[in-house]
Amino acid sequence: MRSFFSMLVKANYTFLRVSSHHHQLSIISYNYREALSNTILFFEGQNFGKLPVNQCIEWRRYFGLSNGAFAHVNVTGGYYDAGDNVKFIFSMAFTTTMLSWSVLEFGGFMSSDISNAKTAICSATYYHLRAIAHPDTIYV
């Protein structure tokens, strides 16, 4: 499986698609490097809490620094789910896992985005660790 994905990355992201309706062959080219860069920007736009100094999204400021204060826990950080001021911990865990896997598999191809990807992974990971600080309880 790994060699298949490596082949896709090295093959300039070109795929063949066969349409079942028209029996025609078309070539589709995707720029996964650009897609990953945009994904990192999306993470930065949804990030909240104390933001990293190298944040690329300049309009985003510190937000939600008192999250969890009512329960005497610190659950700042992490990501909102699509800008609606809601954090879904399990979908965030899945997304962070997929991003981590991408960095492990293709980090060598990420060039300047590798640092931002690791920052995104750390932000979600630290949030998850704080969210399960007490036994038998998940704070969201």
Image (cartoon, rainbow, N blue to C red):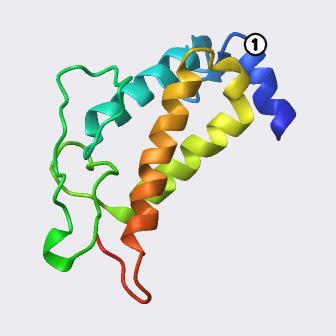
* Front residue of 9 and 21: 9
- Residue 103 appears left or right of 79: right
Residue drawn at (31%, 48%), measured in percent from left and top?
A: 79
Quadrant of image for the C terminus: bottom left
* Front residue of 46 and 17: 46
Above or below residue 61? Residue 81 is: below
Above or below residue 77? Residue 29 is: above
> Residue 60: x, y in percent?
19, 29
- Residue 134 appears left or right of 111: left
According to the picture, the residue beneath numbered tag 1 turns out to be 11
Q: Can residue 80 be seen by looking at this rendering? A: yes
Residue drawn at (73%, 35%), measured in percent from left and top?
A: 105
Above or below residue 114? Residue 64 is: below
Q: What's the residue type where badge 1 is placed?
A: Ala
Residue drawn at (36%, 84%), measured in percent from left and top?
A: 137
> Residue 102: x, y in percent?
63, 37
Above or below residue 108? Residue 5 is: below
Q: Secondary structure at mark 1?
A: loop
- Residue 76 appears left or right of 97: left
Quadrant of image for the N terminus: top right
**Within the image, what quadrant is residue 17 found in?**
top right
> Residue 87: x, y in percent?
27, 58
